[in-house]
C-alpha cells in the first residue's frame, strides 16, 4: 500500500513538514531559554560585582537578590543560607561544582540558577558559584519543552491527515485517466481521456495522451486504408493474370491469343513488380542520406537530358540559378516522380518547366491542377483524386517524394490552380 505514489507523496510532505516544524520549535525553545538565562545571569553578575566592589558590603546587602547563596570552589557557603542538611545536598553540591555554564539545579523543592563567576582577589584568581532562587523557571522550561513536543506530534499528525486528503484529491484526475486508458484498445481508438483543464501538469499529461491517441488513431486508419488499397490494387492485376492464363489453356493452339495473353501477363507482372518495389521503398527506413552541395541549374540540365529522351512528346525548360544541399540519388528520384506526375496531368499543353533558386527546386506543369481540399491528401499512399482515376499508376509516386524529401530534412509545397496547372516546390535542407 505504501508503495503507491499517493502514500509516497503523503509521507514525504509529512516528514518535511515535521522536520521544519521540529527545527522551528527547537530553535524557539532554545532562544527563549537562552534569552531568559542571559538576562538573569547578567543582572546577577552586575549585582554581585557591585556588592563586591562596595566598601560597605559587610553592612549593606540590599543590592543583592534575595535568597542569594555564594559558594567557593570548595563548596563552602560564604554568603547566604542553604539547607546543607538536606538528604540530597551532596549530590546537589557535586552538580553545582561541576557547572561550566549557567544551569538550573534543584535541591528538594527549591530550584536555583547556578552561575560560575571568576573574581580577582588579593590571593589571586578564584572561582565563586552564585546560586540564585529560580522561582521554578527550570520547571517552566521543562514544561515548555514538553508542550512543544506535544505540539510537534499533533501538528505532524494533522499534516499527515491533511496531506493525505489533498494528495488524494490532486491525484484523483490521474486515477480517472488511468481507468479510462485501460478501456482504450486498438479496436476503438475514438475514446479520449479526461482533461481536468487549468493548464497544470495533470492537464498537460491528459493533452499529451490525447494527442498521442489522435496520432495512433490516424496511424491505424492509414494502416487499414493502406491494407485495403493494396488488396484492391493487387486484386485487379492478379485477376487479369488469372483470366489470360485461362485463355492460354483454352486456346493453346491459337498462337495469336497465346502471344497476346503472354504479353499482357508479362506487362501485368511488371506492373505488380513496380508496385511491390515502390511499396518496399516506402516501407524501408532511410538511414543513409548523404547531403552534398549542388549547382542546381547544372543538376537540372543533366536530368532534363534524360527526361527529354523518355518523354519525347514534351518540351522541358529550365529557369533560375542557385545552389543547394541534397542527396543526389534521392533528388533524382524526387525529380523523376514529379516529372512523371506532371506528364500524366499536363493535358493539351505538353510543356514542363523545372525551376531552381538558392535552396529549392520545382517542377511545374500546365495541366488540370489540384483542388484546394486535395492538396494535403495527394501525398498519402494510394490516394487518387476523382479527376485522376483514369490515369495509370497506383498513387505511390507523391508518397515516395514526400518520404524522400523529409528524409533529407527538407519540405515540399504545392501551388496549384484548377485548369492552369500545378507546381511542386522542394525546399532543400541547409548544409
Image (tube, rainbow, N blue to C red):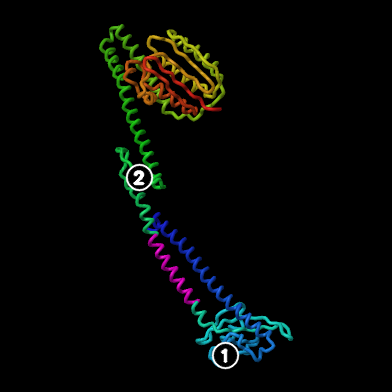
Residue 152 position (above or below residue 304): below
User: Does the segment drawn in magenta span residue 155?
Assistant: yes
Residue 223 position (above or below residue 422): below
x then y, percent, for residue 332: 49, 19
Residue topped by disc 2: 195
User: Does the segment drawn in magenta span residue 251?
Assistant: no
Residue 427 position (above or below residue 201): above
Q: Earlier in the sequence, mark 1 or mark 2?
A: 1
Closest to the camera, between mark 1 and mark 2, is: 1
Residue 426 position (above or below residue 204): above
Q: Secondary structure at mark 2?
A: loop
Q: Residue at x 67, y 85 (%)?
A: 52
Residue topped by disc 1: 82
Q: Residue at x 28, y 8 (%)?
A: 253
Q: Is residue 192 visible?
A: yes
x then y, percent, for residue 14: 43, 61
Magenta segment boundaries in residue numbering? 141-162
Q: CA distance from mark 1 to mark 2?
A: 78 Å
Q: Secondary structure at mark 1?
A: loop
Kindly indicate whether the residue at mark 2 contacts the one at mark 1 (C-beta within 8 angstroms). no
Residue in front for this viewpoint, 260 or 232: 232
Image quadrant containing the C terminus: top right
Amino acid at each position: 500500500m505504501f508503495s503507491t505514489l499517493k502514500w509516497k507523496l503523503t509521507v514525504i510532505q509529512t516528514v518535511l513538514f515535521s522536520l521544519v516544524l521540529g527545527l522551528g520549535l527547537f530553535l524557539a525553545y532554545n532562544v527563549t531559554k537562552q534569552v531568559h538565562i542571559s538576562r538573569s545571569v547578567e543582572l546577577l553578575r552586575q549585582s554581585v560585582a557591585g556588592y563586591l566592589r562596595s566598601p560597605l558590603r559587610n553592612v549593606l546587602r540590599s543590592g543583592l537578590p534575595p535568597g542569594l547563596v555564594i559558594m567557593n570552589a570548595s563548596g563552602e557557603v560564604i554568603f547566604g543560607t542553604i539547607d546543607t542538611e538536606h538528604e540530597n545536598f551532596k549530590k546537589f553540591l557535586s552538580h553545582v561544582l561541576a557547572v561550566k555554564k549557567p544551569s538550573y539545579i534543584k535541591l528538594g523543592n527549591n530550584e536555583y540558577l547556578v552561575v560560575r563567576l571568576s573574581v580577582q582577589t588579593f590571593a589571586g584568581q578564584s572561582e565563586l558559584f552564585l546560586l540564585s532562587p529560580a522561582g521554578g523557571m527550570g520547571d517552566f522550561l521543562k514544561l515548555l519543552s514538553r508542550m512543544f513536543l506535544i505540539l510537534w506530534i499533533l501538528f505532524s499528525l494533522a499534516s499527515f491527515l491533511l496531506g493525505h486528503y489533498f494528495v488524494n484529491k490532486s491525484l484523483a484526475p490521474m486515477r480517472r485517466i488511468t481507468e479510462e486508458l485501460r478501456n482504450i484498445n486498438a479496436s476503438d481508438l475514438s475514446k479520449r481521456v479526461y482533461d481536468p483543464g487549468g493548464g497544470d501538469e495533470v492537464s498537460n499529461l491528459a493533452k499529451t495522451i490525447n494527442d498521442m491517441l489522435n496520432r495512433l488513431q490516424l496511424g491505424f486508419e492509414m494502416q487499414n486504408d493502406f491494407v485495403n488499397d493494396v488488396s484492391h490494387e493487387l486484386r485487379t492485376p492478379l485477376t487479369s493474370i488469372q483470366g489470360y492464363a485461362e485463355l492460354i489453356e483454352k486456346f493453346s493452339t491459337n498462337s495469336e491469343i497465346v502471344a497476346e495473353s503472354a504479353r499482357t501477363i508479362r506487362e501485368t507482372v511488371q506492373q505488380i513488380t513496380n508496385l511491390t518495389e515502390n511499396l518496399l521503398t516506402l516501407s524501408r527506413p532511410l538511414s543513409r542520406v548523404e547531403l552534398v552541395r549542388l549547382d542546381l541549374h547544372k543538376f537540372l540540365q543533366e536530368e532534363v537530358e534524360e527526361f527529354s529522351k523518355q518523354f519525347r512528346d514534351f518540351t522541358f525548360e529550365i529557369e533560375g540559378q542557385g545552389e543547394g544541399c541534397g542527396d543526389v540519388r534521392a533528388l533524382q528520384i524526387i525529380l523523376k516522380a514529379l516529372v512523371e506526375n506532371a506528364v500524366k496531368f499536363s493535358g493539351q499543353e505538353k510543356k514542363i518547366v523545372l525551376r531552381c533558386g538558392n535552396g529549392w527546386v520545382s517542377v511545374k506543369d500546365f495541366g488540370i491542377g489540384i483542388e484546394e481540399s486535395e492538396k494535403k491528401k495527394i501525398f498519402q499512399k494510394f490516394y487518387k483524386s476523382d479527376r485522376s482515376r483514369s490515369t495509370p499508376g497506383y498513387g505511390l509516386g507523391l508518397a515516395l517524394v514526400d518520404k524522400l524529401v523529409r528524409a533529407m530534412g527538407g519540405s515540399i509545397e504545392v501551388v496549384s490552380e484548377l485548369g492552369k496547372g500545378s507546381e511542386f516546390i522542394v525546399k532543400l535542407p541547409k548544409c
